[in-house]
Amino acid sequence: MKSTGEVMGLDSDFGTAFAKSQEAATGSLPTSGTVFVSVANRDKRTMIMPIQRLASLGFNLVATSGTANMLRRNGIECTTVAKQTDLAAGTNPDDLRSVVDLINDGEIDFILNTPASTAAARGDGYDIRAAATSQGVSCVTTVQGAVAAVQAIEALKDTTTVVRAIQDVEHDR
């Protein structure tokens, strides 16, 4: 199977470089675990491939109801979780746990969340990002970032990367 980078026409070194940049900036991307996915309607079609790739790399997926339905229609297994706004409005008929609870309980290792422009979605996105920041969970909010992150995760699974400060690298003079 071609990697996401090969399918997208990007250099295979890009994934390694992006992984290093993320480690230096925010901490390592996970190479296993559980990914929370909530994707705006405008992004659903373009996010199928990166999400499929994460599933094929062995990640467990949890998603909000609309995204979960889209994933299942495309043959991707996932567990449904509630949005914070569902809990606040009392519209959680299945008594699902919220994504924020899962993040705060350390059960989410990576987040793909492309927020919609509604007030409720903005509120949910804020709650998700705040929980992710407090728990040190990487959170990607764009399709382009998701593709780059998946390439980075593939690179991390394929090789051992070392991050060094530029000051520690010997330069030819």
Image (cartoon, rainbow, N blue to C red):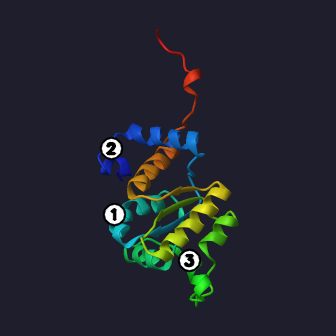
Q: Residue at x 56, y 83 (%)?
A: 86
The residue identified by callout 3 is 83
- Mark on residue 10? 2
Image spot of residue 28 (x, y percent): 59, 46
Density class for disc 1 (Cα within 10 Å; few <14, some 14-19, many ≥20) is few
Q: Is residue 3 visible?
A: no
The extreme right residue here reads: 105
For marks 1 and 2, the one nearer the N-term is 2
Q: Is residue 49 visible?
A: yes
Q: Residue at x 53, y 67 (%)?
A: 125
Question: Relative to 6, is 120 above or below?
Answer: below
Image spot of residue 149 (x, y percent): 46, 51
For marks 3 and 2, the one nearer the N-term is 2
Q: Residue at x 64, y 63 (%)?
A: 131
The residue identified by callout 1 is 46
Question: Relative to 92, is 153 above or below?
Answer: above
